[in-house]
Image (cartoon, grey):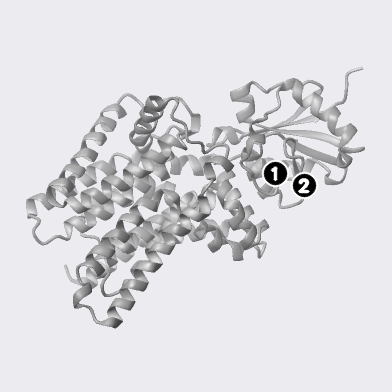
């Protein structure tokens, strides 16, 4: 096939991918994690952001990209389109330059991560495939474009902590391949160029550590816990393979896939391991990069954040594996038979996740991803901002409502006693009010908090509280609103009106 024809076909496939995923993006409602990023970028200056990032557990690059636009007071749709465009660019780069065959390419771009979770869920994860694929493209040319290569590693490391080991290993590889081996034969100008490029990478790695040092003591959710290590390992490893094939997120803790999916999950494990075997046999350096980078991610989940292994997180490991297989398939000494076998294994591994992506695509069009938008619309239409206070005891789940209200009404944090602008992940967020606690809080607020004087009190209670903690019928409150069920089950909402003490 001629290069021109190949280019046109790749452009066409990318265009179809872009149209399909854009339809999903347009239908997608913002949920809590997306709203948090945008509201932080909107409400903080750059110095406040860097101070706060230790509480977030994420480095700064994605927030800094969003900050100028968030401060223009435009819609969060900008962030959604930015993430979508990043994935469209990643797909074109992958189709045009990767050495995978047609079957493997089709399976990868229609896999759950690429079809839905990366392009539609607007998070920092969405720009990782573009950065990783750009690195794969530049890797053989790192000696010709050292600054571009170094800049990509800097950006990737500062996009998400789970890419730190991968970036660190690529930095060591660059040091050995382009400086250590060649140093004696280099011209002074070359020494300066490559040393500067290495310095950029190193500064990027150090920056991540400096930004996030102390996260496990600042963020109450991200804690290093080895008390039930066996349980954590089992949970993380099982979710790593189960959720890619059939994600359980709509109803946490319940295995929702049919029995027919069990063989697919078992096969996924075997195919995954066989790809590592191929790497080990044919290129131990690439095996080491893939193994240690993905192991680092799994250790983070096992020790610090094993609450839920989202599909985007799973695919962050998969794109590292794709990076290494990309480089492997470009090797001249690889036999045609092994190339076909490797592509077949890759294709099968990713195509097993196709139904998961289609399932979420259909659900996101048919249902609300989060009920935050629906709830905010009801609030603005039915609750007078001037004579009321809306209270929540669950800042993390309510933050999506805060975004959609856009200041028309404010949400008061019961624990922190301020109007919520963004979530602070401290000890207080665990102080969820029970049914009687809401009544006691209303009495306390009316007596001691000035902004509650002569105001109606409304309780905004996420389904999380009701389903997990049995917070349903509140004493001396009347249920006046309940949202429709959402894909993110716990981001449904109930609103109660405080009726005062029973006489």
- The answer for how far apart the CA atoms under marks 1 and 2 are is 9 Å
Label 1 SS: helix
**In terms of depth relative to the viewer, which is nearer, 107 or 137?**
137
**Residue at the disc numbered 2:** 409
Can residue 358 be seen?
Answer: no
What residue lies at 46% left-to-right and 37% top-to-bottom? Answer: 304
Percent x, y of residue 264: 27, 32
Q: Counting residues from the N terminus, which is met first, the one under dot 1 or under dot 2?
A: 1
**In terms of depth relative to the viewer, which is nearer, 281 or 472?**
281
> Residue 393 falls in which quadrant of the image?
top right
Percent x, y of residue 265: 29, 32
For the C terminus, the image quarter is top right
**Residue at the disc numbered 1:** 376
**468 relative position to 344: left or right:** right
**148 relative position to 456: left or right:** left
- Whether tag 1 and tag 2 are in contact, CB under 8 A, the answer is yes
Label 2 SS: loop
What residue lies at 65% left-to-right and 61% top-to-bottom? Answer: 45
Vertical position of residue 424 compared to residue 263: above or below: below
**In terms of depth relative to the viewer, which is nearer, 467 or 29?**
467
Percent x, y of residue 73: 67, 62
The image's mark for residue 385 is none
**374 relative position to 253: left or right:** right
Vertical position of residue 277 compared to residue 479: above or below: below
């Amino acid at each position: 096939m001629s290069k021109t024809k190949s280019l046109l076909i790749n452009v066409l496939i990318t265009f179809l991918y872009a149209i399909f995923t854009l339809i999903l993006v347009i239908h997608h409602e913002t949920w809590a994690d997306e709203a948090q990023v945008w509201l932080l970028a909107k409400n903080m200056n750059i110095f406040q952001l860097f101070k706060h990032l230790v509480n977030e557990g994420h480095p700064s690059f994605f927030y800094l990209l969003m900050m100028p636009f968030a401060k223009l007071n435009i819609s969060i749709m900008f962030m959604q389109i930015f993430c979508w465009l990043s994935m469209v660019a990643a797909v074109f780069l992958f189709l045009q330059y990767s050495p995978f065959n047609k079957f493997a390419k089709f399976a990868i771009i229609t896999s759950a991560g690429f079809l839905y979770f990366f392009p539609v869920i607007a998070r920092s994860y969405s720009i990782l495939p573009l950065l990783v694929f750009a690195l794969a493209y530049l890797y053989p040319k790192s000696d010709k474009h050292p600054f571009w290569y170094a800049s990509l590693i800097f950006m990737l490391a500062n996009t998400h902590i789970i890419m730190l080991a991968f970036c660190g290993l690529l930095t060591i590889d660059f040091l050995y391949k382009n400086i250590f081996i060649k140093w004696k034969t280099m011209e002074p100008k070359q020494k300066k160029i490559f040393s500067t490029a290495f310095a950029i990478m190193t500064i990027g790695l150090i920056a991540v550590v400096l930004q996030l040092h102390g996260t496990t003591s600042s963020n109450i959710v991200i804690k290093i816990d080895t008390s039930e290590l066996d349980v954590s390992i089992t949970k993380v490893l099982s979710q790593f393979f189960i959720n890619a094939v059939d994600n359980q997120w709509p109803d946490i803790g319940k295995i929702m896939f049919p029995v027919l999916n069990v063989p697919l999950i078992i096969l996924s494990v075997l195919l995954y391991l066989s790809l590592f075997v191929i790497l080990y046999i044919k290129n131990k350096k690439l095996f080491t990069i893939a193994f240690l980078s993905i192991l680092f991610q799994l250790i983070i989940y096992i020790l610090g954040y094993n609450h839920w292994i989202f599909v985007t997180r799973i695919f962050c490991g998969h794109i590292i594996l794709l990076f290494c297989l990309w480089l492997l398939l470009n090797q001249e000494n690889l036999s045609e038979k092994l190339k076909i076998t490797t592509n077949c294994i890759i294709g099968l591994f990713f195509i097993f996740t196709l139904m998961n992506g289609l399932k979420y695509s259909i659900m996101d069009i048919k249902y609300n991803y989060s009920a935050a938008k629906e709830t905010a619309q009801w609030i603005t239409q039915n609750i007078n901002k001037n004579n009321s206070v809306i209270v929540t005891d669950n800042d993390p789940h309510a933050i999506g409502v805060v975004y959609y209200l856009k200041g028309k009404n404010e949400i008061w944090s019961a624990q922190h006693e301020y109007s919520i602008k963004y979530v602070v992940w401290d000890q207080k967020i665990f102080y969820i009010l029970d049914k009687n606690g809401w009544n006691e809080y209303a009495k306390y607020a009316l007596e001691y908090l000035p902004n509650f004087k002569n105001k109606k009190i409304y309780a905004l209670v996420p389904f999380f509280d009701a389903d997990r903690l049995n917070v349903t019928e509140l004493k001396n409150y009347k249920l006046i609103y309940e949202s429709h069920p959402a894909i993110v089950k716990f981001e449904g909402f109930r609103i109660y009106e405080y009726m005062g003490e029973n006489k």
